[in-house]
Image: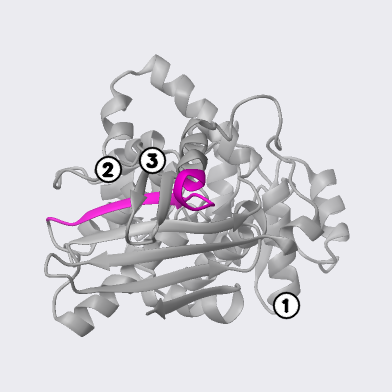
């Protein structure tokens, strides 16, 4: 029996949730969907402000009231949730979706919580048919799908996957979201309470229970990288992205090989000693430190979002010198403008393209080519081979 809604946007009164709702309202007028949040009055206000139809259904639900969350998930095929930090507010929703066979997409970059949910709910989600997909924003879709598309190219061209891929963030305008900063703080607090999380957080294979691959490249030290002819520095999202990339490989049966090595770094501006100095400065910089930057629920202006962009290069290397390159670019700021489009299209991919079976997934493992096609045609991303 068909459910009432194809999609419910949970957290629609928050900054990112509002952007998701605005995107759906503007681009999918025939979609059966609803907005959900804690306050009926705020939902009504957002519905009016984003220009959604006055008849668009609203659902009141609160993470602190598991019964309201359970009622919500039973009305939708897929729930989009932007309510984070997920380790503080997401557990009842994942549990309800796993129990009731409801699809789920989020923006999570909290590997300790993700591993806990995998351990607790993987079998239940598989049995109920719930397709639960973490990390459907800037972390980790461009990286997860970038590696996947490059490995697809390598396998077609060379007959074997590349044993080594480098992810290099060449340019990026627009900061990380307030939710990302709050998630990091919640993760540090969880680590203080539960030191055993160190193993999950510190390993590139923290999200692949039962599989531990080879030693991975050091991503903490600035160095000169001949692959991009520049100095590179640590990239703050690498600890979550690399885990998702390796989880995709495991979930799909190791199409990248069991000895696959992957790292992510940020290209430092400047040449020679200037590049080295810039890389060292980036390595010391904490983008989440201090009191500046957006708080959860806040974000940049429409102009700043539209002026934002990112450019990521993926370099495949073989021991005999063969290789290939692929770039992933986005046309909005990574933390909000592009992320809101990516999570919306991820949910629509589950609904309309009917990808995958029940379980806890990465975007690359369950949606792959179908999501790439959507992102290129609708969400301003490009996946292009470079010479």
Within the magenta stretch, is there residue 267? Answer: yes
Dot 3 and dot 2 residues touching (CB under 8 Å): no
Location of mark 3 (residue): 222
**CA gap, disc 1 and disc 2:** 41 Å
Per the rendering, the mark at residue 29 is 1
Name the residue located 38 percent from the left edge and 77 percent from the top edge. 369
Q: Nearer the viewer, residue 95 or 374?
A: 374
Name which of mark 3 and mark 1 comes first in the sequence.
1
Within the magenta stretch, is there residue 384? Answer: no
Looking at the figure, which quarter contains the C terminus? bottom left
Location of mark 2 (residue): 204
Name which of mark 1 and mark 2 comes first in the sequence.
1
The x and y percentages for residue 214 are 13, 46
Horizontal relation, residue 302 to residue 6: left or right:
right
Q: Quadrant of residue 39?
A: top right
Return the residue found at the far front.
273
Q: Secondary structure at mark 2?
A: loop
């Amino acid at each position: 029996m068909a459910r009432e809604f194809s999609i419910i946007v949970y957290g629609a009164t928050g900054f990112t949730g509002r952007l998701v709702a605005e995107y759906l309202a503007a681009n999918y007028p025939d979609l059966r969907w609803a907005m959900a949040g804690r306050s009926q009055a705020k939902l009504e206000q957002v519905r009016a402000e984003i220009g959604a139809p006055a008849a668009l259904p609203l659902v009141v639900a609160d993470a602190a009231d598991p019964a309201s969350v359970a009622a919500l998930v039973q009305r939708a095929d897929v729930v989009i949730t932007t309510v984070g930090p997920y380790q503080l507010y997401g557990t009842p929703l994942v549990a309800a979706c796993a129990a009731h066979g409801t699809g789920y997409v989020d923006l999570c970059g909290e590997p300790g919580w993700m591993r806990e949910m995998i351990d607790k709910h993987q079998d239940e989600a598989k049995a109920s048919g719930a397709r639960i997909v973490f990390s459907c924003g800037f972390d980790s879709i461009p990286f997860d799908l970038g590696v996947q598309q490059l490995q697809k190219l390598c396998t077609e061209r060379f007959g074997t996957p590349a044993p080594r891929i480098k992810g290099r963030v060449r340019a990026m305008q627009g900061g990380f979201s307030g939710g990302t900063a709050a998630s990091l703080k919640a993760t540090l607090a969880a680590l203080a309470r539960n030191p055993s999380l160190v193993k999950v957080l510190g390993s590139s294979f923290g999200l692949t229970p039962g599989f531990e691959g080879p030693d991975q490249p050091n991503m903490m030290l600035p160095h000169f990288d001949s692959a991009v002819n520049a100095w590179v520095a640590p990239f703050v999202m690498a600890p979550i992205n690399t885990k998702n990339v390796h989880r995709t490989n495991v979930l799909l049966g190791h199409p990248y090989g069991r000895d696959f090595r992957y790292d992510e770094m940020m290209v430092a501006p400047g040449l020679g000693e200037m590049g080295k100095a810039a890389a060292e400065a980036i390595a010391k910089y904490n983008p989440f430190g201090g009191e500046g930057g957006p708080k959860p629920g806040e974000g940049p202006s429409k102009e700043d979002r539209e002026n934002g962009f990112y450019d990521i290069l993926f370099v495949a290397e073989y021991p005999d010198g063969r290789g290939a390159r692929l770039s992933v670019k986005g046309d909005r700021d990574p933390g909000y403008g592009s992320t809101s489009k990516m999570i919306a299209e991820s949910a629509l991919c589950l609904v309309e393209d009917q990808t995958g079976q029940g379980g806890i997934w990465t975007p690359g493992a369950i949606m792959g080519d179908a999501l790439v096609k959507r992102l290129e045609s609708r969400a301003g991303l490009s996946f292009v081979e470079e010479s």
